[in-house]
Image (cartoon, helix red, strand yellow):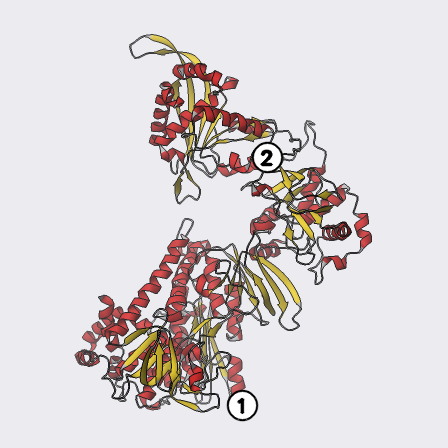
Amino acid sequence: MSRLLQTPFLPSVSLPTKTRSSVTGFRVKPRIIPIQAKIREIFMPALSSTMTEGKIVSWVKSEGDKLNKGESVVVVESDKADMDVETFYDGYLAAIMVEEGGVAPVGSAIALLAETEDEIADAKAKASGGGGDSKAPPPASPPTATVVAPVAVEKKIAAPPVAIKAVAASAVHPASEGGKRIVASPYAKKLAKELNVELAGLVGSGPMGRIVAKDVEAVAAGGGVQAAVAVKEVVAVPGVELGSVVPFTTMQGAVSRNMVESLAVPTFRVGYTISTDALDALYKKIKSKGVTMTALLAKATALALAKHPVVNSSCRDGNSFVYNSSINVAVAVAIDGGLITPVLQNADKVDIYSLSRKWKELVDKARAKQLQPQEYNTGTFTLSNLGMFGVDRFDAILPPGTGAIMAVGASQPSVVATKDGRIGMKNQMQVNVTADHRVIYGADLAQFLQTLASIIEDPKDLTF
Amino acid sequence: MQSAMALSFSQTSFTRPNHVLGSSGSVFSTPRSLRFCGLRREAFGFSTSNQLATRSNRIQFLSRKSFQVSASASSNGNGAPPKSFDYDLIIIGAGVGGHGAALHAVEKGLKTAIIEGDVVGGTCVNRGCVPSKALLAVSGRMRELQNEHHMKSFGLQVSAAGYDRQGVADHANNLATKIRNNLTNSMKAIGVDILTGFGSVLGPQKVKYGKDNIITAKDIIIATGSVPFVPKGIEVDGKTVITSDHALKLESVPEWIAIVGSGYIGLEFSDVYTALGSEVTFIEALDQLMPGFDPEISKLAQRVLINPRKIDYHTGVFASKITPARDGKPVLIELIDAKTKEPKDTLEVDAALIATGRAPFTNGLGLENVNVVTQRGFIPVDERMRVIDGKGTLVPNLYCIGDANGKLMLAHAASAQGISVVEQVSGRDHVLNHLSIPAACFTHPEISMVGLTEPQAKEKGEKEGFKVSVVKTSFKANTKALAENEGEGIAKMIYRPDNGEILGVHIFGLHAADLIHEASNAIALGTRIQDIKLAVHAHPTLSEVLDELFKAAKVESHATTRTVSEKVVV
């Protein structure tokens, strides 16, 4: 995990793929607008539990294209992966409200879907009407009636300035009639008044894109994201010019948030040196069957965790903690543009061969940014291995929401004194566990590491 | 065990003070003996009687003696069965009103039965006053613990306060269960027959309950109470669109809840929800929040209870349509202008609480059998709670008390009305003075009132040709309030300067609900300001707030020498 802080982050440019998931979370749930039943909004879906905003990687379809139910419309980059977003309805992509490269909060409209070709113009009028004036007073009449057609034509060309305004519109609540109404919680409104913050155009992070108090506080503190500003930064051509300021990609943003959040957890570290001769021998024996070292380590860790459930627990609120029912080992993987932790679920129960196959599949998916939320956010214990780079020991940051993370160094031949009083050569690796001391104490980790060492030094159980 | 003991003691402890005070009249001859919200005695009766007992030990032995005598007298139990009827009195509905009537009826020697189709205790105990007080007790503490400034000014340090929703909900539920059991036992112990089943009137002096049990009684009291009123267009699903019935179970604490109606139910819930972390939006049909309160009080209350909290509001609007959250969509509330009926706004919130008042529960009561026509569901009654039929004539031997008659929809008013009816059927004419019944809203701080509001009093004064004066005092001038760091609040009294009559008292401040009784008792007893201002209040206590009011009032007439008991006007 510590590695992610040094990773040279490059904005990811992943190719939109045609593969789609059947998981509902990936789908766009179009919202029916009561006033205009036949023009539907496509809004930014929540692709993970931590996702608050998404970046449009590319539009698979362009304005005016006919869409069939289930077809991919847009590729969205969340904090963890790129995903295809598909439509639930037949119709025409009438208006794109957030251009490629634009950012929109979860739940805000990114495009309009018209049922018939005739309604495309209406939808465009609505999109431009909503996006063109984000400070419009609450309307008393349906938006379509207030917007004149020429405006729609003008705004048809998706020039960057339009995109900026479109995002401003999309920053508001989906039910806010295309940006004409501001949906903010009572306290947010109160704070905005007190702190003199303009709510129009503010990115809401609450349920369904609602503006909540912390959004207002963020803006007042200067760190907030006023939609228009955010887009300007995104629109600026990203480059690797030295000395230039590069805004975070979505993933970098997520990593940054998680890292800062981790500071709220009191952690401590316990290290252990484990002999790996037996493990190396086993690995050599079954390597041909597709077994990887990562899978072996994950399996050994999972078996040790099964005997020490407290190390597999997690404390979220500071008042209680959960003994997690399954042992899901997350393994950190460096990918282009960041870091992700694919999860080997039930690693204690799945046999080593299946686990290895699963791992390969996950890594391939991660590289293609195709991981599904449950494949990267359900980990209960994290493994981070930098041994392949020759690193002999390092220290990992505990990912929020889990109890412990283990940093694994390289296995190296070392000179050791053996029990029978001789000097010998053994392969040894150092592991270092970082844990949440609110729930996991020194003795817990020590016992866990002792168990782990005995499993690795006598690895016959791993192949069962 | 304890509750049974508490009962027999409290039974007498409430009659005894009349003797101690030296009242020469019959025990229940005056409104002073009215028992508001009868359940309170049972809930706290044990400690009360203990106190009284010890005090009588200290003060005079004689009173202790009379205490024992009356205790044995009251243990006679339910009255002897009448000759031609099954019962002397049948009460339909075992809420607080019915309970108060039943206890008093037994005391009067009437053979009494009470019919309950649901659970004993009715709305107040199970879905109203009682569980809400449990939630408010929690919210008051949360509020205090969260108020860093408040704690700091005491020199206290408290780490972040948190709560367990289920624990809070359990507290409310346990309290309701406990009070319900106390209530049931208190009736069983003195021999009231509790008949289970839905009761209805079959004809004069005849009642049916359950499937087909028919019983007769000399007199019948209808005390069926009320249910939450849900205006049309609002779809209640019990999860995201709820009434007070659901809210009291506290199954969830939504991030943002809209409360439709800013009366005392809405206000109390806003207090609970904001203390537990929710944000609240009030929707009020009238142009002002907190209608029904004295304007000055509601203005100050708004400054303290609404403005600094995470609450906003829409006034002058109706919620014409409310759709529960489903399919990932939030709760949708359509607002229309209360006057023009034009659409005004749409709200999307996490939950909506419907607190638009209560509707009488009088369906299926068999009122057609006695030719009674309800008015908006309410049973029409005269000032003696006698039911009036469709032609405007009194239905003999049929009474209606509590929320079902709509005179004053408060638990203790129902109980007082029930006692008034029992007084009448046991041979003493009695008319309840509703203006002496106090009301309270248990927000933090509390609001309480009795009698007329300032505009009402002025209107009355103009009509009847008397002058009306107002006197006010602030809690900031009260030592005890300042010691508690709770100086926010006012008390005001509306009175007649010519004769010193108290017309109304309104209090907003710490423990206002407990303070009001000095004023309500004075109104009930007809005590004049020039007399009560000579009474002594312990120092330092909050009761000095009222003392201030009495002393500050300018009354033209002088203190009377007559004793209190002679002045009572029934």
From the viewer's perspective, is residue B108 above or below residue B253?
below
* Residue located beneath label 1 in the image: B463
The alpha-carbon separation of the residues under discs 1 and 2 comes to: 77 Å
Circle 2 residue:
A81
Q: Is residue B316 left or right of residue B428?
A: right
Residue B19 location in percent, x, y? 24, 83
Q: Between residue B237 and residue B569, name the one nearer to us.
A: B237
x, y percentage for residue B561? Answer: 33, 90
Q: Label 2: how many residues lie within 10 Å, few (<14), some (14-19) or many (20+)? A: many
What chain does mark 2 sit on?
Answer: A
Q: Residue at x 46, y 74 (%)?
A: B473
- Given contact means CB atoms under 8 Å apart, are the residues at marks 1 and 2 in contact? no
Horizontal and vertical percent position of residue A265: 45, 38
Image position, residue B296 (x, y; %): 53, 74
Which picture quadrant has residue B175? bottom left
Q: Picture quarter containing residue A317?
A: top left
